[in-house]
Amino acid sequence: MNIATLASKLGVSRGTVTNRLRRLEDDQVIVGYSVRLRPDAEPRGIRAWTNILVEGNQTRAVIASLLGEPGVAALHDTNGRWDLLAELRAESMTELSDLLERVRLIKGIGNTETSILLATFR
């Protein structure tokens, strides 16, 4: 939320909030900020999720390779049948196909299963 809203909710001035945030940044309590977009805010582009099965004890190497792939928006450790879940983003089906091919060629990946986001209801 913006500083004015935060100040209003806390019942203090905007300057007080600004000064406190600056101190938290200087003390490295706050080390960064991020932006969360509504799912429909990116009408262009394709989102997909790929479940990944890692062969043997190669999880760390596979994670390092996936994190170096620009089309991997997020990577999650999971339990159950699959070892990892990768959120993929691409501008076109061709780009997604190329991304999936690169992912499948990573040493240590035994199997994958990909689902493409069609609609978001909530």
Image (cartoon, helix red, strand yellow):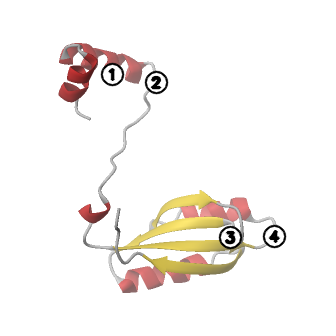
N-terminal of the pair, mark 2 or mark 4, is: 2
Residue 107, image x, y percentages: 69, 75
Which quadrant holds residue 89?
bottom left
Q: Are marks 3 and 2 in contact (CB under 8 Å)?
A: no
Residue 17, image x, y percentages: 27, 18
Q: Relative to residue 65, is residue 55 drawn left or right?
A: right
N-terminal of the pair, mark 1 or mark 4, is: 1
Q: Relative to residue 102, is residue 7 drawn left or right?
A: left
Tell us which disc is closer to us: 2 or 1. Answer: 1
How many neighbours does mark 3 have within 10 angstroms: few (below 14), some (14-19), or many (20 or more)? some
Residue 19, image x, y percentages: 28, 15
Residue 26, image x, y percentages: 40, 20
**Residue at image mark 3:** 82
Q: Image point 40% across, 36% down: which residue? A: 32
Decide: is 27 above or below 40.
above
Give the alpha-carbon distance from disc 3 to disc 1, as whole Å: 41 Å
* Amino acid on which the number 4 mark rests in the picture: Gly
Q: Relative to residue 47, is residue 8 drawn left or right?
A: left
N-terminal of the pair, mark 3 or mark 1, is: 1
Give the alpha-carbon distance from disc 3 to disc 4, as whole Å: 13 Å
Tell us which disc is closer to us: 3 or 1. Answer: 3
Camera-nearest residue between 119 and 58: 119
N-terminal of the pair, mark 3 or mark 4, is: 4
Secondary structure beneath label 4: loop
Give the alpha-carbon distance from disc 2 to disc 4, as whole Å: 39 Å
Give the quarter of the figure containing the N terminus. Answer: top left
**Residue at image mark 2:** 28
Camera-nearest residue between 48 and 89: 48
Decide: is 105 above or below 65.
below
**Residue at image mark 1:** 21
Q: Image point 33% across, 47% down: which residue? A: 35
* Amino acid on which the number 3 mark rests in the picture: Trp
